[in-house]
Image (cartoon, helix red, strand yellow):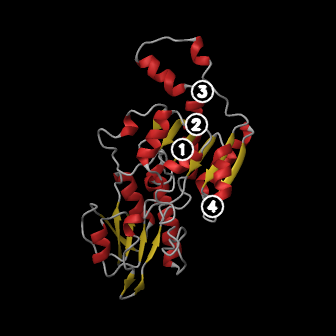
Amino acid sequence: MTAISVYLPLSATQQDRLRREATGYKIQFCDVTAACDSPVVFGNPDVRIVMANQNLRWLQLESVGFGEYAALDWSRPSGTALVSNLAGFFADPVAETALAGVLALYRGIDQLGDLRRRAEWIGDPVRAGLRLLTGAKVTLFGRGAINARLKQLLTPFGCTVVTFGSDWIEADLEAALANSDIIVATVPDTPSTRGLFDARRFSQMKPGSVFCNLGRGSLVKETALATALNSGQLSGAVIDVTHDEPLPAGHPFWITPNTILTQHSGGGTSDEIDRKINTFLTNLSLFRSGKPPLGLVDFTKGY
């Protein structure tokens, strides 16, 4: 019987579901550091485990990101192993996190929460600093599912939205940044995106704009972003991803003003694990019938 090794924490009910619905397979639930030689793997095991598994035919990641696996040799005695990720899986929650963060900054919710914790009433003076999302000019950096969904969510607000993909032109991006109230980045980690938002790029942004990063921490030069926030060049930031996670003590993002730090929780939902199982079972059906799984990773493109 073909084995499936599962490398994500599941409840007893979820384990029973996999055993019941993955008929014809032997399911083994593993710690992320436990070795395996299963041809099918579900989850994100340690890289060394993947390298050592010469029987691997298909790895279904429980993430969109796959940077730690990008440099591996996927050739195996039985042929090239397939790798699929959760492309598009987090579009709704991450887009809603971006929208919630921007609205919190625009309507002073973050500031008002701090005032409440300090039992400090300011009242009317707060009103002068509040802004409307309605009619804002927005630049979306990334043409993936997250920004596509965010564009839909922004429609009722009458925002002017411009989107850039991997074929962006420098002059066009500079013009958009200089004219945008909000910039949202959701791109993957690739050689062309690493450090793209640096001090020069933040200086090109419209003074008082809001910057949001919900893609990969490698996109941003974090010291430069902190400087832009401290100087007032940017009026706020929504940061879901950072270079180091957890964010270390003493990092400037802990104290930069008007910063909403969502701790890489932007894609979370209460039914997240169950939906990941749904995706795996759908792809397992495709795999066992000889068809490529959905979300097949193209390592030459980096996504």
Q: Residue at x 54, y 37 (%)?
A: 234
- For marks 2 and 4 on the same chain, the one whose residue lies earlier in the sequence: 2
CA gap, disc 4 and disc 1: 16 Å
Q: Amino acid at mark 3?
A: Arg
**Nearer to the camera, 249 or 146:** 249
Task: Judge from the rendering whether residue 143 lies leftward or rightward of residue 268; answer left or right.
Answer: right
Q: Residue at x 41, y 43 (%)?
A: 263
Q: Identify the residue position indicated by label 1 in the image.
A: 212
CA gap, disc 4 and disc 3: 30 Å
Query: What is the secondary structure assignment of the residue under circle 2?
Result: helix
Q: Is residue 29 visible?
A: yes
CA gap, disc 1 and disc 2: 8 Å
CA gap, disc 3 and disc 2: 8 Å
Q: Position of residue 292 (x, y in %)?
A: 54, 76
Label of residue 102 in the image: 2
Q: Identify the residue position indicated by label 4 in the image.
A: 165
Callout 4 touching callout 3 (CB < 8 Å)? no
Q: Amino acid at mark 4?
A: Gly
Q: Amino acid at mark 1?
A: Cys
- For marks 1 and 3 on the same chain, the one whose residue lies earlier in the sequence: 3
Q: Quadrant of the N terminus?
A: bottom left
Callout 1 touching callout 2 (CB < 8 Å)? yes
Label of residue 53 in the image: none
- For marks 4 and 3 on the same chain, the one whose residue lies earlier in the sequence: 3
Task: Judge from the rendering whether residue 293 lies leftward or rightward of residue 222; answer left or right.
Answer: right
Q: Position of residue 209 (x, y in %)?
A: 60, 38
Q: Identify the residue position indicated by label 3 in the image.
A: 107
Q: Would you place residue 200 above or below residue 23 in this image?
A: above
